[in-house]
């Protein structure tokens, strides 16, 4: 851990005042002294922006702004994006857990939990390198493992649940220990004070079987003290006592006991009651372990993806450099120069695509911030058309680019990002060429309008079953090996540049038309005079 808790500021976000109070008390008992609270995600976001916060601890289910929306807002804020974020949840739907992992959560704490669970998660959170948080899932690498895909050999092996038997009677204590020793890790306390000491130690018991009548501290007093201590307040207690009167039962349940059983009850009945309760605790443990595994899997996949991207960028840069070196040689035959230039352009385009991986996941989760610059869209389209002709030469396609303005006039520029434009129109042109029949024509027209409009058309109609979901993730039809990510990423890229994209299909004269509108760069007179460039909002 990088430093004591008392040096850090933690933001606690929960809509229930009682839970905020309990959590604050638990944190104070751990040594936290700088604690800020908020009643929902919207208030939490304001607090995080108004104060220097080091860690965020948030519940999931809240009104106004829930935990997931709060997390997404934090991750999309340039100043808050890297904050350690621990989400508290009772969620059991794996798809929703995948969503919160994809949004960039650092840790998950499953309800119900005790102070020891909370401390363990916070320590894990702060041991992470803050410069490399688990980032949201990218387009091509899943950040989670579907539990249903696991092999039986991958089952999570958890230690036995822990029971503490607190009873001053040696015979009763021995009977209870033997009753549960075959299934659980059973410890014993011969009195109330020893029971308090054992409850405060780590690991804490998952359930306390508490007698009432003990000489040093009776069971009621022990439980009252447990409830007044943040470290032991959430440990479940089941009274097992000879005093089974209604008054005793009422007092025990008022103290928060999960059950009240007379010693004269059937051992079989007591065993089943304990089993039923601990089954719920075990389900929570299984969920916690599974969610931890999902988070770790996301981290490992991220590392592999980063290493792969790094290696690919090095190889592509080397290939591009070698092609350009050969082009520069004086004795290189002219018939090879065009091919080498095409190789260099292709390597450059692949390098751009690989580099974009770091931006695409930000777009998926609303974290991307565009640094808009003038983009020579006509040059981009002509270069991509040349690459497409070479790539689909076997299909004998005609790939043309036209601009609806007089020859010799300066071409209009888009206001966006050149790398994003490359990737956007490369995806669309590739899909159009794949869908076009051999010997047909694919046309691209740049319309001199405001916003700029690019119209890309190819023969062949989009199948009816995918038209309404054409730009959704993983939607594909009739393409062997198709991932369904091309049009999805095109929509992301267009939206990131504040543009729009539309697909129209014609069944009469089978054809598909994609229309992309992007903001137009408007040159200002001050630029011609050499003043600083001011781009429109």
Image (tube, rainbow, N blue to C red):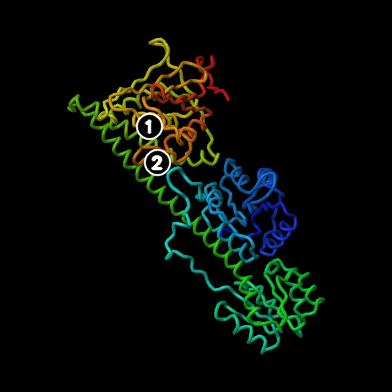
Please tell me which of labels 1 and 2 falls first in the chain. 1
Across and down, in percent, residue 347 comes to 32, 35
Query: 324 or 233: nearer the eye?
Result: 233
The residue that appears at 26% across and 28% down in the rendered structure is: 393
Query: 510 or 262: nearer the eye?
Result: 510
Query: 436 or 282: nearer the eye?
Result: 436
* Residue 502 located left or right of residue 278: left
| Quadrant housing the C terminus | top right
Tell me the number on the disc at residue 169. none
> Is disc 2 surrounded by few (<14), some (14 to 19) or many (20+) residues within 10 Å?
some
* Residue hosting label 2: 483
> Is disc 1 surrounded by few (<14), some (14 to 19) or many (20+) residues within 10 Å?
some
The residue that appears at 37% across and 25% down in the rendered structure is: 458
* Residue 389 located left or right of residue 60: left
Across and down, in percent, residue 373 comes to 49, 26
* SS at mark 1 in the image: helix
* Residue 65 located left or right of residue 384: right
Identify whether 91 is placed above or below 495: below
| Quadrant housing the N terminus | bottom right
* Residue hosting label 1: 431
Across and down, in percent, residue 41 comes to 67, 46
Across and down, in percent, residue 255 comes to 77, 70
The residue that appears at 51% across and 40% down in the rendered structure is: 364
Contact check, label 1 and label 2, Cβ < 8 Å = no
Residue occupying the far bottom of the picture? 171
Residue occupying the far front of the picture? 508
């Amino acid at each position: 851990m990088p430093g004591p808790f008392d040096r850090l500021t933690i933001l606690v976000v929960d809509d229930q005042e009682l839970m905020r109070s309990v959590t604050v008390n638990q944190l104070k008992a751990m040594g936290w002294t700088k604690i800020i609270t908020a009643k929902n995600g919207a208030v939490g976001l304001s607090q995080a922006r108004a104060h220097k916060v080091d860690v965020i601890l948030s519940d999931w289910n809240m009104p106004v702004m829930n935990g997931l929306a709060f997390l997404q807002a934090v991750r999309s804020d340039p100043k808050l994006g890297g904050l350690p974020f621990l989400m508290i949840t009772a969620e059991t739907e794996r798809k929703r857990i995948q969503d919160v992992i994809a949004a960039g959560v650092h840790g998950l704490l499953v309800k119900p939990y005790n102070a020891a669970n909370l401390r363990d998660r916070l320590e894990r959170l702060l041991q992470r390198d803050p410069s490399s948080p688990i980032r949201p899932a990218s387009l091509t690498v899943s950040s989670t493992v579907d539990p249903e895909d696991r092999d039986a050999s991958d089952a999570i092996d958890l230690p036995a649940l822990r029971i503490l038997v607190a009873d001053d009677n040696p015979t009763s204590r021995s009977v209870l220990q033997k009753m549960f020793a075959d299934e659980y890790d059973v410890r014993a306390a011969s009195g109330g004070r020893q029971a308090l000491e054992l409850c405060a130690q780590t690991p804490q018991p998952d359930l306390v079987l508490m007698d009432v009548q003990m000489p040093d501290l009776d069971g009621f007093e022990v439980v009252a003290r447990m409830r007044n201590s943040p470290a032991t307040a959430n440990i479940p207690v089941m009274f097992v006592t000879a005093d089974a009167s209604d008054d005793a039962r009422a007092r025990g349940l008022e103290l928060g006991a999960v059950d009240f059983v007379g010693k004269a009850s059937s051992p079989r009945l007591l065993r089943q009651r304990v089993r039923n309760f601990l089954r719920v605790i075990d389900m929570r443990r299984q969920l916690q372990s599974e969610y931890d595994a999902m988070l770790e899997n996301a981290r490992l996949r991220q590392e592999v993806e980063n290493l792969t991207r790094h290696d690919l960028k090095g190889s592509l840069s080397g290939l591009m450099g070698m092609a350009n070196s050969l082009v520069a040689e004086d004795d290189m035959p002219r018939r090879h120069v065009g091919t080498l230039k095409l190789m260099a352009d292709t390597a450059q385009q692949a390098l751009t695509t690989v580099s974009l991986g770091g931006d695409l996941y930000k777009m998926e989760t609303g974290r991307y911030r565009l640094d808009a610059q003038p983009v020579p869209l006509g040059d981009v389209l002509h270069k991509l058309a040349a690459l497409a002709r070479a790539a689909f030469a076997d299909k004998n396609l005609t790939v043309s680019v036209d601009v609806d303005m007089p020859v010799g006039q300066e071409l209009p520029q888009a206001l966006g990002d050149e790398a994003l434009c490359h990737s956007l129109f490369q995806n669309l042109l590739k899909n159009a060429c794949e869908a076009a029949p051999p010997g047909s024509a694919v046309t691209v027209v740049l319309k001199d309008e405001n916003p700029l409009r690019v119209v890309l058309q190819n023969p062949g109609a989009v199948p009816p079953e995918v038209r309404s979901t054409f730009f959704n993730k993983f939607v594909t039809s009739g393409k062997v090996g198709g991932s369904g990510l091309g049009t999805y990423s095109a929509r992301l890229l267009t939206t990131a540049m504040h543009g729009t994209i539309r697909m129209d299909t014609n069944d009469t004269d089978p054809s598909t038309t994609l229309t992309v509108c992007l903001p137009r760069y408007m040159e200002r007179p001050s630029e011609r005079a050499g003043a600083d460039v001011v781009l429109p909002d």
